[in-house]
Image (cartoon, rainbow, N blue to C red):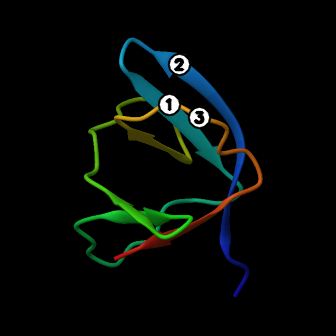
Amino acid sequence: MMGYKVVSQWKIGKYLALELNQSLPKTEYTKYKISGKEYEPVPVYDLPNHIAIADMGDFEGKEVEFI
């Protein structure tokens, strides 16, 4: 199975919405891990294949692990 990668991002207030290259996993997870750093999930509604984090930076091309 192909890994989850960030293909685009955009700022929403103090959050970043990250568009992934595929649908979110159906398995249960409580955090995201990007470049070795763990993030608490921020609810995202009406944006397929998106997650959000409370951080700033360039995440395009980074792998996302659901933990």
Residue that mark 3 sits on: 57
Q: Which amino acid does the dot numbered 1 rest on?
A: Met
Q: Which residue sits furthest bottom?
A: 1
x 34%, y 77%: residue:
67
x 56%, y 65%: residue:
35
Q: What's the mark number on residue 56? A: 1
Residue that mark 2 sits on: 11
Q: Nearer the viewer, residue 4 or 38?
A: 38
Real-space CA distance between mark 2 and mark 3, rounded to the nearest whole angstrom? 10 Å
Left or right: where 48 falls relative to 62: left
Q: Nearer the viewer, residue 33 or 1?
A: 33
x 34%, y 78%: residue:
27
Left or right: where 8 falls relative to 51: right
Q: Which amino acid does the dot numbered 3 rest on?
A: Gly
Label 2 residue SS: strand
x 36%, y 19%: residue:
14
Label 3 residue SS: loop
Q: Return the disc, 2 or 1, that comes first in the chain's sequence.
A: 2
Left or right: where 42 falls relative to 60: left
Crowd band around label 1 with a 10 angstrom C-alpha radius: few (<14), some (14–19), many (20+): few
Q: Which amino acid does the dot numbered 2 rest on?
A: Lys
Q: Give the image location of residue 58, x and y in percent.
A: 67, 38
Q: Return the disc, 2 or 3, that comes first in the chain's sequence.
A: 2
Assign the N terminus to one quadrant of the image: bottom right
Mark 1 touches mark 3? (CB < 8 Å) = yes
Quadrant location of residue 29?
Answer: bottom left
Mark 2 touches mark 1? (CB < 8 Å) = yes
